[in-house]
Image: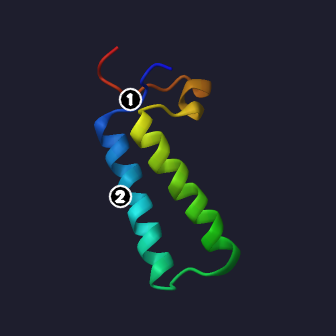
């Protein structure tokens, strides 16, 4: 796996995951939509930590500055 995520992209994904988690724990989002958003948040965190997004590789996007 080659890295295909830049620092800004990773930061936005982590920030989005944190916001989703806060909304979930404050009961702003509930039910099925809450579970779907939590799965998305977990995927965002995993892809941020491994610096690789499978969807980016399928589309051909690379936000990482280093090649």
The residue that appears at 62% across and 26% down in the rendered structure is: 58
Residue at the far right in the pictured view? 32
25 and 59: which is toward the camera? 25
35 relative to 10 in the view: left or right:
right
Q: Nearer the viewer, mark 2 or mark 1?
A: 2
Name the spot of residue 16 as percent of width and height, x first: 42, 59
**The quadrant where residue 26 appears:** bottom left
The residue that appears at 51% across and 85% down in the rendered structure is: 27
Residue 34, placed above or below residue 5? below
Disc 2 marks which residue?
15
Name the spot of residue 54 as percent of width and height, x first: 58, 31
Name the spot of residue 12 as percent of width and height, x first: 36, 51
Residue 30, placed above or below residue 38? below
Residue at the far bottom in the pictured view? 27
63 and 34: which is toward the camera? 34
| Numbered circles on residues, count | 2
Mark 2–mark 1 CB contact (< 8 Å) = no
Crowding at mark 1 (Cα within 10 Å: few <14, some 14-19, many 20+): some
5 and 35: which is toward the camera? 35
**The quadrant where residue 31 appears:** bottom right
Name the spot of residue 10 as percent of width and height, x first: 36, 43
The residue that appears at 61% across and 81% down in the rendered structure is: 30
Task: Identify the image quadrant of the C terminus.
Answer: top left
Residue 25, placed above or below residue 17? below
Colour setup of the view: rainbow
Disc 1 marks which residue?
63
Disc with the residue nearer the chain's start (2 vs 1): 2
The residue that appears at 30% across and 18% down in the rendered structure is: 66
Structural distance between the alpha carbons of marks 2 and 1:
17 Å
Does dot 1 land on a helix, a strand or a loop?
A: loop
Does dot 2 land on a helix, a strand or a loop?
A: helix
Crowding at mark 2 (Cα within 10 Å: few <14, some 14-19, many 20+): some
């Amino acid at each position: 796996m080659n890295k295909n995520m830049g620092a800004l992209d990773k930061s936005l994904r982590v920030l989005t995951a944190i916001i989703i988690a806060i909304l979930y724990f404050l009961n702003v989002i509930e039910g099925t939509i809450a579970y779907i958003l939590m799965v998305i948040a977990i995927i965002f965190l995993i892809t941020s930590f491994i610096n690789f997004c499978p969807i980016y590789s399928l589309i051909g996007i690379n936000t990482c500055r280093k090649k």
